Amino acid sequence: TRHALHILQTSRSLAEIMDAVKSLETSTRLSSICCILFTEANAAMILLDLIRSCNRSVPHVELVQCILLTLDNVAQYRSLVPSFADCNAAEIFLDKMQMFRDKDGIFCLSTSLLGCIA
């Protein structure tokens, strides 16, 4: 988790970022401690900034899906939701709902996360 967070903060390579986000998705799905580390590192804000820059290209769609899955894993723990629950996040989730309304997975994850922060 720490290594993946470091990669997110320092890397400019899409492949490295994708690997780091996949690692974070797995670790947050399997461990509440990793979810806590994720929030302490302010990783949600890093991921939300990253997701804002994504477009509809295939690599970006995969990255958006993985980021939303990671945030959904963290949102399972209600006490951690305030770490990313703000107007900026709501705007991003609404934007992704509109941009990917034809992609069920991304649309549903964005809707679910918007509901969690609301």
Image: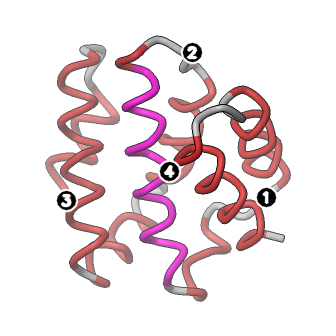
Label 4, on which residue? 68
Quadrant occupied by the N terminus: bottom left
Q: Earlier in the sequence, mark 1 or mark 4?
A: 4
Q: Is mark 2 on a helix, strand or loop?
A: loop
**Marks 2/3: CA–CA distance:** 26 Å
Amino acid bearing label 1: Asp
Q: Which residue corresponds to the image point at 22% horizontal and 40% vertical from the top-left?
A: 20
Residue 5 position within the rendered picture, expressed as x and y whole percent measured from the top left? 28, 47
Check the image and report above or below for 4 versus 60: below
Amino acid bearing label 2: Asn
Label 1, on which residue? 86
Q: Residues within 10 Å of mark 2 (few under 14, many from 20)?
A: some
**Marks 2/4: CA–CA distance:** 15 Å
Q: Residues within 10 Å of mark 4 (few under 14, many from 20)?
A: many
Return the mark for residue 49: none
Label 3, on which residue? 1
Q: Which residue corresponds to the image point at 84% horizontal and 71% vertical from the top-left?
A: 118
Label 2, on which residue? 55
